[in-house]
Image (cartoon, rainbow, N blue to C red):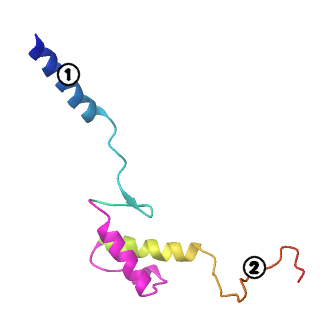
Amino acid sequence: MNVRILIAAGALALAGSLGAPASAQETFHGYDCTDDCSGHEAGYDWAQRNDIADESDCDGNSQSFNEGCQAYVEEQSSEPVRRYQPNGGGDDEDGSE
């Protein structure tokens, strides 16, 4: 009897883990990763080092590398341009000096 309970409990645990929704797939800046995100990270880092500004330059042999590169380009195009401003740089909100 105790063996049946253990088997049933094990079967329920296994069924629960199989029936439960899978953990969210790992993503990199919105792109799905297959295993880890190392290919995406490599493409992003390469684009950053080479100051890539156009997605058409992200045309390597690896889809994950290209997506990482594209993520960098997309991120750069969505950020406002920041220019150096001496002395802390903030403008007064009311426009006075």
Seen in the image, is 75 located left or right of residue 45? right
Expressed as whole percent of the image width and height from the top left, the position of residue 81 reads: 63, 81
Q: How busy is the neighbourhood of tag 1: few (under 14 within 10 Å), some, or many (20 plus)?
A: few
Residue 29 within the magenta-colored segment of the rendering: no
**Residue displayed at 31% across by 80% down:** 60
Relative to residue 4, is residue 45 depicted above or below? below
Counting residues from the N terminus, which is met first, the one under dot 2 or under dot 1?
A: 1
Is label 2 in contact with label 1 (beta carbons under 8 Å)? no
Q: Which mark is residue 9?
A: 1
Expressed as whole percent of the image width and height from the top left, the position of residue 34 reads: 28, 59
Element under disc 2: loop
Seen in the image, is 9 located left or right of residue 64? left
**Residue displayed at 17% across by 19% down:** 8
Q: CA distance from mark 2 to mark 1?
A: 64 Å
Seen in the image, is 28 located left or right of residue 94? left
Expressed as whole percent of the image width and height from the top left, the position of residue 21 reads: 34, 38
| Residue bearing the label numbered 2 | 90
Q: Magenta stretch?
A: 35-62
Q: How busy is the neighbourhood of tag 2: few (under 14 within 10 Å), some, or many (20 plus)?
A: few
Q: Which mark is residue 83?
A: none
